[in-house]
């Protein structure tokens, strides 16, 4: 098992870049356990990931970011807005339960992409930019349940 430490700064000019680094790492590794702590001195989250590397096998194909679906500046329909609101409410509750910032669960862009794409299976969540194995294992079932209920 390996250990990786990330510093995720909450200042707006750093947040997305730091989050992308964590997301990229999560796609390429299997997280076994994680710990977080808020560092008040520099207003950042310290994220410690205990992980295993995915095996290098011929069957493992990494998708490029351009192949994944991402709702850019798409206009949402009324039903998609209802889905997005339900997903944001779920995300807030989940973040509160786990004592994590909401963007650790999913970013607004990721939730918007889910609302537009409307996956019906966990495998389809992999088609959405920002969703890797870790996120799908932890939250996939709940996200699909929300999509079915709204």
Image: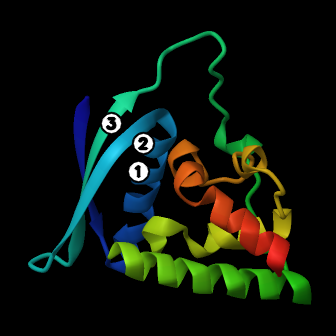
User: What residue is shown at x 14% (from left), y 75% (from top)?
Assistant: 42
Label ID, residue 51: 3
> Of the residues tagged 2 and 1, which is closer to the observer?
2
Question: How dense is the environment of label 2, judged by Cα within 10 Å: few (below 14), some, or many (20 and up)?
Answer: some
Contact? badges 3 and 1 (CB < 8 Å): no
Using the rendered image of the protein, determine whether residue 150 is visible from the camera's viewpoint: yes
- x and y percentages locating residue 59 in the rendered image: 66, 15
Q: Which residue is mark 2?
A: 25
Using the rendered image of the protein, determine whether residue 76 is visible from the camera's viewpoint: no
**139 horizontally vs 29: left or right:** right
In the image, is residue 97 above or below residue 129? below
Q: Secondary structure at mark 3?
A: strand
Q: Which of the 4 image quadrants contains residue 123?
A: top right
- x and y percentages locating residue 4 in the rendered image: 24, 42
Q: Which of the 4 image quadrants contains residue 118?
A: bottom right
For marks 3 and 1, the one nearer the N-term is 1
Q: Secondary structure at mark 2?
A: helix
User: What residue is shown at x 40% (from left), y 52% (from top)?
Assistant: 22
**22 horizontally vs 121: left or right:** left
User: What residue is shown at x 29% (from left), y 52% (from top)?
Assistant: 34
Q: CA distance from mark 3 to mark 1?
A: 15 Å
- x and y percentages locating residue 101 in the rendered image: 38, 76
In the image, is residue 107 above or below residue 130? below
Q: CA distance from mark 2 to mark 1?
A: 6 Å
Q: Quadrant of the C terminus?
A: bottom right
Contact? badges 2 and 1 (CB < 8 Å): yes
Q: Which residue is mark 1?
A: 21
User: What residue is shown at x 75% (from left), y 41% (from top)?
Assistant: 67
- Which scheme is used to colour this image of the protein? rainbow
């Amino acid at each position: 098992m390996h250990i990786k430490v990330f510093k995720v700064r909450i200042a707006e000019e750093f947040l997305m870049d730091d989050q992308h680094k964590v997301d990229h790492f999560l796609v390429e590794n299997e997280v076994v356990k994680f710990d977080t702590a808020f560092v008040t001195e520099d207003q950042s989250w310290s994220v410690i990931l205990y992980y295993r590397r995915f095996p290098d096998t011929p069957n493992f194909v990494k998708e490029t970011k351009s192949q994944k679906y991402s709702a850019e500046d798409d206009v949402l329909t009324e039903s998609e807005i209802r889905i997005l609101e339900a997903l944001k409410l779920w995300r807030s509750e989940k973040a509160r339960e786990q004592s994590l910032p909401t963007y650790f669960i999913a970013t607004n862009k990721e939730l918007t992409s889910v609302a537009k794409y409307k996956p019906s299976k966990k495998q389809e969540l992999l088609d959405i930019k920002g969703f890797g194995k870790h996120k799908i294992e932890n939250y996939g079932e709940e996200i699909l349940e929300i999509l079915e209920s709204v």
